[in-house]
Image (cartoon, rainbow, N blue to C red):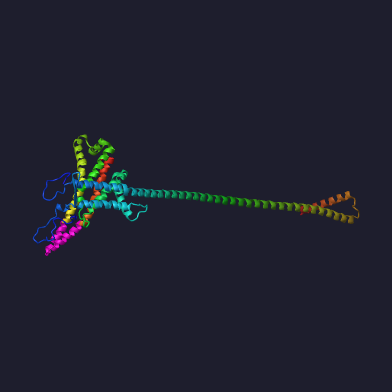
Amino acid sequence: MSYLFAAAEESEGPNVLAVPLDELIIGILAFLIVFGLLAKVALPSIKKTLAERTDKIEGGLARAEQAQAEAQQVLAEYREKLAAAHLEAADIRTAAQAERVAIVDSARGEAQQAAVGVAERAQAQIAAETSQAKSALSREVGQLSFELAGKIVGESLADDARAKAVVDRFIAELEAAPAAAEGRA
Amino acid sequence: MAVDLAVPSFDPECHLGSGCGFPAPGADIFFFDPVWTFTILGIEFNITKQIILLVLVGAAVVGFFWYAFRRPALVPRGAQNVGEMGYLFIRDGIARDTIGKAGDRFVPLLFTAFFLVWPLNFLGILPFAQIPVTATFAIPVAFALVIYFTWVPLGIKRQGVGGFFKAMTMPPDVPKAMYVLLIPIEFVSNFLVRPFTHCVRLFANMFAGHLLIATFSVGAFYLLSASVLGIIGSTASFVVAVGMTAFEVLIQFLQAYVFTMLAAVYLNDAVHGH
């Protein structure tokens, strides 16, 4: 047998540390052939598949992250819009309140104005009617007293100028009388 | 041309008290008569049981992984699952762990080392094979040489002759004077002793383990006799042999792992410096 190295001298039994060249060559060839077949035939496909799987998982994770981000963004937008809507509603409510107050105020003002107008007109009418009544009354009183005096005196007081002076004096006396009576009393 | 399966010194009539001494198994249990001998280029090739087993294991390993990875699916099932477990064990557990991302290149080499050594170790307890092929010294030597002649040229290619030998023999942060001592020590340690320890560690473990199992198995058979000592001794020896076999399963895996791990460490030296 050929040896790469024969360790010890031949003692009893075979030398376990001897390396026969044939076994060494077959061992190296076996390793290289198995290596070649595994490296060229069996392993490339699984390497590719594992890389694909990693890609897919990482891609999936990336996609999930993107979807999550999008969802977050949509949620934020929605919240923003909701807040804006709330704000707008509050504004509208405030404006309506103000408008209501204004409407009530203006209505009240108009009503007051109308009331004042009604009262003023009533007073003016009352005053006019009063003065009208007064003048009518004084004329009637003058007429009556004139007729009365005519009957008593028997003299016609048809003459206007004199009649008017008499009436006037009479009325003046009438007006003065109560004051004199009050002064005496 | 029958393969010699029997333990050479086996004698079925030899028991305790039958007048023969304990036929302790020796180194001869690792040697089988060649079933076929031929000569190529003046080298005599002896095809022994170990060589046949080596070829069978090589074919089985290639066959299994070719079958497992023939049409790999993104969602693995069956054999692909098992094959992937092995591939990821080498890629993540050994190559990337030791060499880093650059280790991906060496996955096929480390894969081959592990999935040749482990089954070859396993043959030690496989019925009918019952011989760890890695306990034949030339086989671990062959594998260690392939690893050696991969990482040394690779280191020279990657770091240049000077850079590589400087990295391998001149550890940094050491007083200059120490290099007188360190350079020869590191050189011998890293370039001469390293391949030797690489293969002897595997060989010696498998050799010793197999010898232990054989000793206790032969012991159980030898002690089996019509006496109290014989019954107790035989039973105890048998139990130990079974226990050693279970322990051997662990050692077989561990030594394959250590062999592959060391190969990865050497490759890392070549890629990244010592």
Left or right position of B33 against A45: left
* Residue farthest left in this picture: B19
Question: Is B40 in front, or is A87?
Answer: B40
Quadrant assignment for the C terminus of chain A: bottom right
Question: Is B9 in front, or is B192?
Answer: B9
* Residue farthest top in this picture: B176
Q: Position of residue B109 (x, y in %)?
A: 28, 46
* Total numbered labels placed on residues in the image: 0
Left or right position of B94 against A93: left
Residue B248 located within the stretch drawn in magenta: no
Residue at image position (22%, 47%) is: A26
Q: Dividing the picture into quarters, in which one does residue A150 lie? A: bottom right
Q: Is residue A78 visible?
A: yes
**Secondary structure that dominates the magenta span:** helix
Q: Which residues are magenta?
A: B215-244
Q: Position of residue A128 (x, y in %)?
A: 77, 52
Question: Is B187 in front, or is A11?
Answer: A11
Q: Position of residue B65 (x, y in %)?
A: 30, 52
Q: Is residue A179 visible?
A: no
Residue at image position (28%, 41%) is: B271
* Residue farthest right in this picture: A155
Left or right position of B15 against B59: left
Q: Position of residue B1 (x, y in %)?
A: 19, 54
